[in-house]
Every structure is written in structure tokens, then in C-alpha cells.
Image: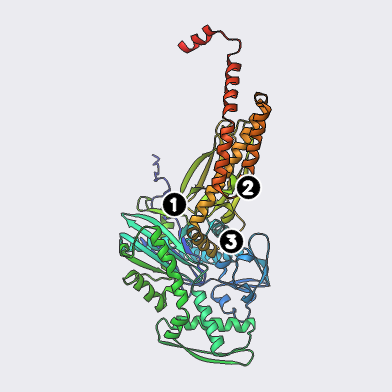
Amino acid sequence: MVLLQIAEPGQSDAPHERRLAVGIDLGTTNSLVATVRSGMAVVLNDELGRSLLPSVVRYTGDGCEVGYEAQAHQTSDPRNTVVSVKRFMGRGLKDIAHRESMPYLFDDAPGMVRLHTAAGPKSPVEVSADILRALRERGEAALGGDLVGAVITVPAYFDDAQRQATKDAARLAGLNVLRLLNEPTAAAIAYGLDNAAEGVYAVYDLGGGTFDISILKLSRGVFEVLSTGGDSALGGDDFDQRIFCWIIEAAKLKPLSPQDARFILSRAREAKEYLTFHGAAPITARLSSGEVVDLTLTTEIFAEITRTLVTKTMQPVRKALRDAKLGVDDVNGVIMVGGATRMPQIQRAVGEFFKKEPLNNLDPDKVVALGAAKQANLLAGNRSADDWLLLDVIPLSLGLEMMGGLVEKIIPRNSTIPIARAQDFTTFRDGQTALAVHVVQGERELVTDCRSLARFELRGIPPMVAGAARIRVTFQVDADGLLSVSAREQTAGVEASVVVKPSYGLSDDEIAHMLKDSLEHSRDDAMRRALKEIQVEAQRLIEAVQSALKSDGELLADDERARIEAAIVALQAAALGENRRHITLAMDTLDADTKDFAARRMDKNIRRALAGRSVAEIAGEESQ
């Protein structure tokens, strides 16, 4: 007798066979890989028992070194040793701040920046792929087999291009991406499942290169992101930089070589980490120039020189609470994520703001990877998808360009993903057979103030009078936060679509700046939008009257036609200005001057429709 093996959809065909999946925290400073064993999420160590993999890659003529081996050469070979590559992901040369102080040779290639190395030019995607490959190999060695996939975490404020670059790096590393997961959400998964927490939680995530704040509601296995925020490329690296500058000033050092600069920066990082558990950190160094550094950095000095950085993290926290329509008292707990949150001044500032001690019972370096591992275990089919539901959000609104350069928002920011929304549009001119679709991202009312994501054209629209066509535009954002847009003309069924893959995207700075601008200029934007709308309406009226004059101008006496044409000229002049009242008055004048003309056209059309038909025929139709 043959027995049929039955498995749940999405589960392994062999009920006792566990599918190998991992969660990866691809960090700016350090990266980790974790998995679920016996129902518990654990971080996988290397052969020497180390859990962290420094996110450092060194390129040589023979290949590359990753992790601790590469980190050992960052002072002796800074040009070929790439650190903090996460800050370059999905960005062009113009997006990279302070690049003049970096030891790298940048190539401003179309799209994403490239770095010149001993192994040739390398994009941030390729560098990240080398880090991910090392993590994949560690996972396969620890689990004893090939991985079915990985959940990879990204900052909540990573835009579409940065997320796509991360997925490309994973594919290059031989990883199947089960999902991209926002880092604060991954941390909430780890805390929510490990501690059975419920209520509203703030996730304060300060890593090596990025800062995120998310407000989440945890309830009966549902993880709902209420709002998310962040700041410009801000992280532990910036605190290192403040110590670096203090050392140069205090020791009165001359301009440094790239090797000495990297050496002093590494000493600055060591001092920062030492101050987490001590009141003072000695800083000693002998430079290649012969200069000697012998200083002591106290916690008081460190707090003073980084005060503005700490304050800078709290501004998005306030904004995220406002977006979630919550106050500090509504927050049940604050989850601390990222190694940089170990700094005493960060712990103190967060505790004072939320009026409660932050949660630190999970290692802030590991919590993101642990949450990602739990999500990977679920998506691989090793446990029921009913165990919990994850509701994440998008950071910025998505919309389309309308006539007059206006933005029509289709999906507002902080909308839960995955999401699909459709809206119907129409044509502007008679006989229009094509429609240009321009997809934008941002909070402002005008296209010029938002970021362009993609353009495509819908062709083959049946020629109709303006406004008759019905074109449905659909936006879809998947669980990874990646966007696709389609347009379909309802009558003829013609369709066009685009998967939005910009060459590089918004920096955290730009996103924060766009949100700030949307608040500061909301009143001005509303007035400019109203002006654009009435200018479009005026143009539509002018074109309609001009079309009527062309087809039925013989119904007018010369003086009547002259008066209408003068009113058209007056409206055209008013529409070029910025006085909405003048445009409205000019439209009213043209409406009044064409009222009799419109009536005559109506009579003419009725007579044409009734020509050659008897009263009896018409009466018979009405009685049916």
C-alpha cells in the first residue's frame, strides 16, 4: 500500500524535515546571521566563537578579505579597505557627504557610485555581496546544508532604490531573499515573541551609520507599525568623528595622511566603547609623522562634544509620536537597538524623554538578527503563518504627476504594506491617444518639490472627447517595500506598467528634509496647488471655447465673436499670472460672453438630431 504524504501549503513536504533559513542583520559597522533552533532564535558564531562579523571588506590583487581579517588592514591599507559601505547603498556621488575626507577613490558612474580598489572598481552592491556571502557560508556551515532563503533587515528609512540594491547584493551572494524586513520591526518581533509583550512600543535604533525610530502596536500576535521616522545618515560613526575632531584639536595635530587619519579614527572608536563602562578613556598613539598623542577623554567631555548628535535623534522621535497621534504616556516601553545605544548619554536621553528605563534585556547588537531569524523561520514554512501577523509601513507618500505639475497622492506615507491602491484618471484633450505616467515620491504638492521615481507611457487609448476615457492607475507596494505601477484604459483594455527601479534613491537626509519641508511649506503648497488647479481649469475652458468657435463660429455675429475672442485673450493673460481672483473673474466673464453661443449650439444640435423625422415618430419613441 502506498501512503500519501500530506503537508500544509507552504510547509515542508516532509513533516519532520526542517527547512534551513536565516535572518541577516546587514549592519553598517557589524553584521550577524541568526537562525531558529528548537524554537529559540540564536546567533550563529564563526569557528572562533565570534558572533559579530565586522562589515569591512579589503580588496587585493588576489581577491578579497572580509570581517576581522580585513579590519586588521584598515589603517595600513585604507584605500582598498571599505568600511561603512551601507552608507553608499543606492546612492550617487552627489548623495555622499564628507567624501573629501574619505580615503577612497570614487568613480561617479551613472546610477550608483563605485570605488576604485586593487581588484578593480567595486559598487556598494558588490561590497555588500561579499559581506553577505561570508554570512551565508557561516550559516551553511553551522546548519550543515544549503539555505532555502534569508530575511535581510534594512533601515526603516531605506527608500526603494536602497532596498533594491540590498536585494541585488543578496542575489549576487547566492541568497534567496524571503523578505526585506525593517530593522525596528525585526527588533519588535524579537521582543514581542520572547517577552510576550503587548501594547505600544517605541523602537529606538541607533546603529553604526543609520538612525530609525518606529512606533509599533503589539497585540495578540499582530505587529502593527503606526509610524516611522529617522534622521540623516546618523549613527555611531558620527560619534567617532566627534572624538576624532576633538583629538586633532586637543593634540594640535597637523594635517594627517590617510593612514594616520584611519589610525586616529580607530582609536576614537575604541575610546567611545571604553567609556560605556568606565569614567575615562586613555588615548595614546604614535603617528607615522613622529607626532605622539597622549590624551584622556572623560565621559563629561564626550557627552559635551556629542550633545547636538543626541539632540538630533530626539527630533524624529517627537515627529513619529505626532504621526501616530500618541503621547509619551501612551508608550508602554522603549526597545533599544544597535550597538551605539550602549552610550550612557543615549540611555540617559531616551530614559528622560519617555520617563521610563529603556529595555535592554536583549543584546542591542543581536536583537535585529534574532527577530529576522524568527521571521525567516516562519516564511520558510517551519511554523504556522498564523502565529503572528506583521504590518509594516512605507516612509514617504507615492503619487502621480497631474496637469499643471501637481501631485496626486495615491498611497500616503505610513500606509501599511503590502498595499495596492487604484484611482481612475482621464484625458485632458480631445482625441488624446496616449498618456504619460510620471511616478513621484514625497509630501509636497508640486512635482518639482518631490523625487521622481519612474516614467512610462500608456498608448492605444481610443480617441474620444476630453474627459471621456477612463484610465485606472494601480500602485502596488510589496512586503519588501518595492513599488510597481500599472495603467489600464477600461474601454479598449490597453495596458502598460513599470516596476520602479531607480538607479539610486533618496538619502536619509533627503527624506527627513522632504518631511520637514512638507510641514514648513504646507500653507504655501496649498495656495500654489489652488493656483495650479485654477490655471488648469482656465486652460481647459479656453480650449473648449476655441474648439466651439472652430466648429460653429458661423452662429455668431462679428461683434459677438470679437467679444468672445477678447475674453479668451484676457483669460490667457490672467492665467499666466498668480492672482487666483483675477483668473476667476476672467473665467466668469468668458462664461457670460459664451452663454448665448452655447444655447445656439444646443439648438443647432437638437435640430440636426430631429431633421427628417415626424412628430408621430418622436411621440412614439417617448411612449415606449
Task: Give above or below for 241 relative to 372.
Answer: below
* Of pointers 3 and 1, the one earlier in the residue sequence: 3
Pointer 3 residue: 90
Q: Which is nearer the N-term, disc 2 or disc 3?
A: 3
Out of 553 and 9, give the one closest to the viewer. Answer: 553
Of labels 1 and 2, the one closer to you: 2
- Amino acid at dot 3: Gly
Question: Residue flagged by tag 1: what amino acid is it?
Answer: Ser
Q: Nearer the viewer, residue 283 or 249?
A: 249
Residue 297 visible (yes or no): yes
Q: Nearer the viewer, residue 504 or 76?
A: 504
Circle 3 SS class: loop
Q: Which mark is residue 415?
A: 1
The alpha-carbon separation of the residues under discs 3 and 1 comes to 23 Å
Asked if residue 53 lies left or right of residue 73, the reply is: left
Q: Callout 2: 10 Å neighbours few (<14), some, many (20+)?
A: few
Mark number, residue 576: 2
Q: Quote the CA–CA distance across marks 1 and 2.
A: 37 Å
